[in-house]
Amino acid sequence: MKRKSVDWILASAVTGLLIMGLIMVFSASSMIAKFEFGNLMFFFQRQILWGAISLISMVAFSKIDYRIFKRHGLPLILMLSSILLLAGLFGFGAYSHGARRWYNLKLMRFQPSELAKLSVIIYTSYYLSAKESRLKDWKKGLLPLITLIGLTVLLIYPQPDLSTSLMILLLAGLLVFVSPVPLKHLAGVALAAVPFAIFALVRNPYQWGRIHSWWVALHNPANAAYQLKQSLIGLGRGGIVGHGLGQSVQKFLFLPDSHTDFIFSIVGEEFGFLGASVILILFLLIFFRGISITRNVHDKFGRYLALGITLNIVLYAFINAGVVSALLPTTGLPMPFFSYGGSSLLFLSVATGILLNISRHTGSEVESIMENNQTRELFSKKIVISAE
């Protein structure tokens, strides 16, 4: 069977977001770059380099058969490499803004948690598809998987990076949920994790502070914490159509992290409700194309992998938008393809390239139809059970 071309709707949406993201990094970062480094282009020059590398990587991985990621022990190699790199941060990581999350590579910084996130998606997809016959056995099925994922999370959390830790658990949990793993096993793991989640919050008063700030902002925006208040001011100032590219006031050092976690507020200020809506619609388009690929790919590994990558992109986008608009507590999660940061952009692009390659293997083969029907039936049963 001749392979299809990539999903050009998905490719166009991602490329459009990447280009718009580069433009917004320049606009949002220019003032902080001038203030800290005396160069308006400081952050943009680095992001444009990462953008070029990321675009090349996306094209390259869209041409590599995604099934190679389940061969030659590659899923386990990726996981173990991520664990080693995360462990190495405690001795060799660069300390910045109260966290030790990066390796300094002279010209750029590398954040291994971004590699770990993609590795977890690949490894979980491989494990659930290759070990399906064991998944109903607790000791031989779910336990080995959560042990490796748990070790990864335990290395990310102390950086500190609670948000990425929780997102990795969420992504892996959603993949396990749609697998044949018994719901009682999944529920047991979730209940066992509750004390650890409480401990993580209690141990770090800063996290409680974020939740309290969000609660205050939700009920009375006028009393919100400084960063949230400035974010809401930016969104409100933008109105329906915004003030135009480069015309943000909040980027003049009023809004902290205006070029990273809160860049979406600058988007709303410069392009208004309509501009922000266009971006969210593009992410929704990615979601629907990703789900379509998930439903129609020929093998189970590809199905899990496509779903994991799609959820990774879209959940991050809507959580970030929720944080910026004070609908969710501050998390520190970036806006995909927009927030300044090379590692995030690179691994998002690699993941998107893999998803594009998976789209080349969708079709109507008999085996694909049968497997799709089985998966949909299983998923429907789980939804009914959980609803009861």
Image (spheres, helix red, strand yellow):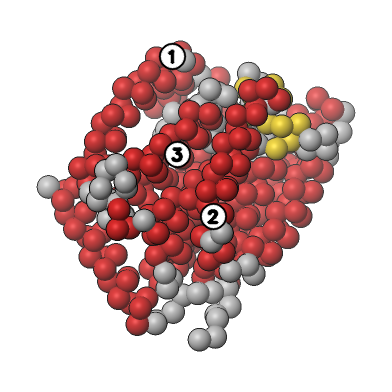
Q: Which numbered tag is attached to residue 149?
A: 3
Query: Mark 3 is on which residue type?
Result: Ile
The image position of residue 323, as x and y in percent, is 48, 34
- N-term-proximal mark, 3 vs 1: 3
- N-term-proximal mark, 2 vs 3: 2
From mark 2 to mark 1, how far is it between C-alphas?
37 Å
From mark 2 to mark 3, how far is it between C-alphas?
17 Å
From mark 3 to mark 1, how far is it between C-alphas?
22 Å
The image position of residue 204, as x and y in percent, is 46, 15
Query: Mark 2 is on which residue type?
Result: Gly
Q: Which numbered tag is attached to residue 203?
A: 1
Query: Mark 1 is on which residue type?
Result: Arg
Q: Quadrant of residue 339?
A: top right
Q: Which numbered tag is attached to residue 136?
A: none
Callout 3 crowding tier (Cα within 10 Å): few <14, some 14–19, many ≥20: many
In the figure, is residue 189 to the left or right of 296? left
The image position of residue 360, as x and y in percent, is 54, 74
